[in-house]
Structure formats: C-alpha cells, structure tokens
C-alpha cells in the first residue's frame, strides 16, 4: 500500500469539490472531525452533508501543501486552506490533518485541526 499515492488521490478528490468523489475513497462508516468547530461526524450520509457545507463555507476551496508525513496506516498533512468569497480577495489559514486508513487504503477517520486565530482573521479581512 503506497500511502503517498493514496494521499494524492484523496487531495485530488477534495480539489474536485465533489463530496461523492471524496467519499469514494472512504471505508464504510467513516468518521470526520473538524476539531473546535464541529463534533464528530460519522457515516457516509453525514460526511457527504458536512463536506458539501465545507465547500459552501469556503468558496473556491483550495489547498497549499507544506508537508506530507507518512506513518503506519495514516498520514499527516500540514496545509493551508485557501478560499475566495464572491467579489473579495483570496483568503487563507493553516490546518493540519491526521488521516487514518484501513488495510485496503480506504479512509476510516479524518481529523482536521485549524489555527483559529488565522480563521477569524481570514473571515474578518476586508
């Protein structure tokens, strides 16, 4: 199992802005948590709704990757989330993902941690 390749496919699915493409890379009954923003979200139906809301909250969602660290059955991604509200300039803030996979390489859990001072500043920017 090549976790770097799986992580690349997963990132491409997120950049497609398509919750179904993302969920196609998840195991049955996966878990997602954006720590400090939501509680734990579990199951494909709930994740589909949560991922769709992310794309609504962050129009023109983008990613700048800083580091991809590979471990046993997981990866950690140090990244910047970028977005652009209609009629406004592009904004960004740092984030960290910890993504766990099963033996088939399917995502079982994704935890996202944000720099909330940067999130607040991004939304308050003129």
Image: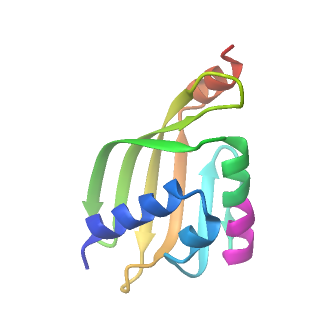
Q: In which quarter of the image is residue 85?
A: top right
In the image, residue 64 sits, relative to residue 123, either above or below, namely: below
Q: Count up the numbered dots.
A: 0
Q: Is residue 125 left or right of residue 110?
A: right
* Chosen colour scheme: rainbow
- Residue drawn at (62%, 20%) of the image: 121
Residue 43, position as x, y percentages in the image? 68, 76
| Magenta segment includes 44 | yes
Viewer-side residue, 125 vs 75 = 125
Please, which residue is most extreme toward the front here? 87
Q: Quadrant of the C terminus?
A: top right
Residue 107, position as x, y percentages in the image? 47, 73
Residue 89, position as x, y percentages in the image? 60, 22
In the image, residue 85 sits, relative to residue 10, either above or below, namely: above
Residue 68, position as x, y percentages in the image? 30, 51
Please, which residue is most extreme toward the top here? 126
In the image, residue 121 sits, relative to residue 50, either above or below, namely: above
Q: In which quarter of the image is the N terminus?
A: bottom left
| Magenta segment includes 11 | no
Q: Write the start and end of the magenta stretch as one range.
A: 43-50
Q: Quadrant of residue 46?
A: bottom right
- Residue drawn at (60%, 31%) of the image: 116
**Magenta stretch: helix, strand or loop mostly:** helix
Q: In which quarter of the image is residue 17?
A: bottom right
Q: In this view, does 68 lie to the left or right of 88?
A: left
- Residue drawn at (59%, 75%) of the image: 30
- Residue drawn at (29%, 68%) of the image: 5
Viewer-side residue, 55 vs 50 = 55
């Amino acid at each position: 199992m090549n976790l770097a390749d799986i992580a690349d496919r997963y990132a491409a699915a997120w950049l497609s802005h398509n919750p179904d493409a993302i969920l196609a890379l998840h195991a049955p009954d996966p878990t997602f948590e954006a720590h400090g923003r939501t509680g734990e979200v579990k199951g494909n139906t709930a994740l589909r709704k949560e991922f769709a809301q992310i794309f609504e909250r962050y129009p023109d969602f983008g990613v700048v990757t800083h580091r991809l660290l590979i471990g046993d059955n997981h990866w950690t991604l140090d990244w910047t989330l970028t977005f652009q509200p209609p009629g406004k300039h592009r904004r960004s803030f740092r984030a960290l993902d910890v993504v766990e996979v099963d033996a088939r390489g399917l995502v079982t859990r994704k935890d996202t941690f944000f720099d909330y001072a940067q999130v607040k500043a991004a939304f308050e920017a003129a």
